[in-house]
Image (cartoon, grey):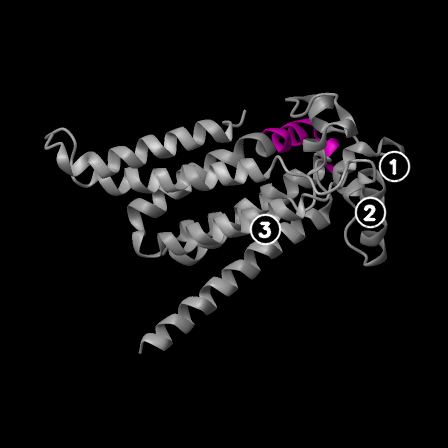
Amino acid sequence: MWMPWQYAVFCAVGLGGVAVAHPLWRVPAMPVRLRPWLREAAVVFVLYAVWRRLGEVSLTGTGKALQRGRDLYDLERTVHLPDELTLQRWTLKATWLARAANWYYIVIHVVPVGIWLAWMFARHRDVYARWRNVFALSSLIVLMIQWVPVAPPRFYPELGFVDTGALLGPRVYDSGGAATGGQLSAMPSMHVAWATGIGLAVFFVARSRWRWLGPAHIVGTLWAVTVTGYHWLADGIVGGGVVVLVAAVVWWWERRRVATVR
């Protein structure tokens, strides 16, 4: 499903090379305005390669992931967060709704990122770099927190949780279980982090009523990752919180830099 980081490096080098050589070509079919797109695509591929490469790192083994997940569940009950099990059971009463959550989890994770980046670069280039940096930095922070494996709810059938993908389809993960470290990167939720980055940018940048699609995307993603059994509610809260914190720091830094120049 994911492009290997090595391929992303090749793409970045190729696109960067074309962007550098573009002014020398004098080819009418290659408009000058294409160069910024090539250069930015190269930057995105570099960020993607770094993200994928760091995703192969794990600071600890998976042996205690199940205990960490259970501890997180107990902590949620202590602070009285909504129970994921109740939310999942409500959703499973409507089979079509549970299947919709499964598809939302799969499709709405990656596809909106490309659409959002292209829209921001084409229509709001003056603030594009700011939001791209917020997205990239928060993704890296979330990834580094995930270096400590935590098992998601679907690993606890004894508590009543089910894997809605395996039950109703489409299935996201194989049956590797806890032995597959990639399935234990649940805390924080990258899905919710990405949705929050996109949602905040759309809400603050867009000027029409369509801006409300941003917050709706955040809520929809948090719902989907929770009722499917792929994430604890706390995973989404932490993932979104990281993005909000990074956005606040970036905003403060830009304000400080402008004040210093003046």
Q: Which residue is mark 1?
A: 159
Per the image, label 1 sits on a secondary structure element best described as helix
Labels 1 and 3: the sequence-earlier one: 3
Q: Which residue is mark 3?
A: 141
Is residue 17 located in the magenta-colored stretch of the structure?
no
- Give the vertical position of 95 relative to 48 (above or below): above
Can you tell which mark lies on residue 73?
A: 2
Q: Which region is colored magenta?
A: 89-103
In this rendering, which labeled residue sits more in front, label 1 or label 2? 2
For the residues labelled 1 and 2, the Cα–Cα distance comes to 10 Å
Report the residue that reaches farthest toward the right.
158
Residue type at the position of mark 1: Leu
Image point (71%, 32%), residue name: 181
Q: Quadrant of the C terminus?
A: bottom left
Tell me, yes or no, whether the two marked residues, 1 and 2, touch with CB atoms within 8 Å.
yes
Local packing at callout 3 (Cα closer than 10 Å; few below 14, some 14-19, many 20+) is some
Residue 251: assigned label: none
Which quarter of the figure has residue 60?
A: top right
- The residues tagged by marks 3 and 2 sit, at their Cα atoms, a distance apart of 22 Å
Q: Nearer the viewer, mark 1 or mark 3?
A: 3
Is 71 placed left or right of 23 in the picture? right
- The amino acid at mark 3 is Ile
| Label 3 vs 2, first from the N-terminus | 2
Kind of element beneath mark 2: helix
Q: Residue at x 39, y 29 (%)?
A: 10
Query: From the viewer's perspective, is the residue at label 3 or at label 2 nearer?
Result: 3
Identify the residue at horizontal 58%, vertical 40% (top origin).
54
Relative to the observer, which residue lies in front, 3 or 239? 3
Report whether 86 appears left or right of 45. Answer: right
